[in-house]
Image: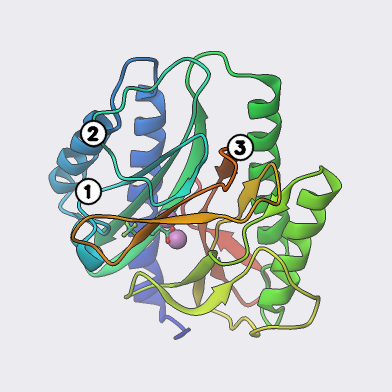
Amino acid sequence: MTPLVASEIKQMEKACQLAGQLLKYLGSLVRPGVTTEELDKIAYDWILSHEAKPAPLGYHGFPKSICTSVNEVICHGVPGSQRLEVGDIVNIDVTCIKDGFYGDTSSTYFVGEVSDQAKKITQCAEECMYQGIDEVKPFATTGDIGYAVNQLARKRGYFTVRDIGGHGIGKVFHDEPFVPSYGKKGRGIRLKPWCCITVEPMINQTSAPIREFAIPHSTIKYYQTGDKSLSAQFEHTVLITDKGHEILTLID
Ligand code: MF3
Ligand code: CO
Ligand code: CO
């Protein structure tokens, strides 16, 4: 968690706006019949044409430019030949490197008409992310964020993933601190002005232990719910300011 100077904040804004714009574009392409590797190829070409690099590609051996996590996949889903089908929910996670700075954002999209339970968990995941972001201010703690996220999820009858979460970000992809989706007010790491973190809660329908799976030739793992129930996630990159925060990956 290294504070950024004004010029570096401008560069983070650029990287984050690029990631946000691409995510919005990819979201508009989600429809029944599209494969996740088609979305990945479009993302790769778009990022290169904007003189940036896809952070996931080659990161600890990760084979693709974005992560696509469908239904019971919690995160780090690898794009492939799977066709999206009516009723699926898919999280698309985009991270761009622009001039050495990282912008990281994800949203969960509906494929055609989805069930009420899919709508409910997806809406809850987005609201949980914003509840967490509301806590981001100088000298608040990572525990404040996690507490707020978990409280809302539990109120709605859902469960947050504990082992995976947000992170510091800037000139590196994954920095300290870990930003949990559970916790106690006032505990954890204190947030410092002019540093960036991600808030990226993963929300599950049940408390079934999560399962991890190897990705060939990579030390990154992907995760699924233990009972194949749904999981949804949203992510923004957030700058801690002197008074509060700015959501750098927000578009419009
Ligand atoms: N973008 C993910 C995050 O939010 C990390 C993906 S790492 C990868 O932290 F290797 F799986 F791409
Ligand atoms: Co992230
Ligand atoms: Co991400």
Residue at left 52%, top 52%? 235
Q: Quarter of the picture for ligand 1?
A: bottom left
Q: Secondary structure at mark 1?
A: loop
Q: Which residue is mark 3?
A: 229
Residue at left 22%, top 48%? 64
Q: Secondary structure at mark 3?
A: loop
Mark 1 vs ligand 1: CB under 8 Å?
A: yes
Q: Which residue is mark 2?
A: 37
Q: Residue 195, percent across and down?
A: 50, 77
In this rendering, which labeled residue sits more in front, label 3 or label 2?
3
Determine whether, in the image, residue 81 is placed left or right of residue 8. left
Q: Residue 43, percent across and down?
A: 24, 39
Q: Residue 1, percent across and down?
A: 48, 84
Residue at left 70%, top 27%? 117
Determine whether, in the image, residue 30 is placed left or right of residue 62. right
The three-letter code of the residue at mark 3 reads Ser
Displayed quadrant of residue 34: top left
Q: Residues within 10 Å of mark 1 (few under 14, many from 20)?
A: many
Q: Which residue is mark 1?
A: 64
The first of marks 1 and 3 along the sequence is 1
The three-letter code of the residue at mark 1 reads Lys
Q: CA distance from mark 3 to mark 2?
A: 23 Å
The dot on residue 53 is none
The reply to whether dot 2 and dot 1 touch (C-beta < 8 Å) is yes
The reply to whether dot 1 and dot 3 touch (C-beta < 8 Å) is no
The three-letter code of the residue at mark 2 reads Glu
The answer to whether residue 35 is above or below residue 177 is: above
The first of marks 3 and 2 along the sequence is 2
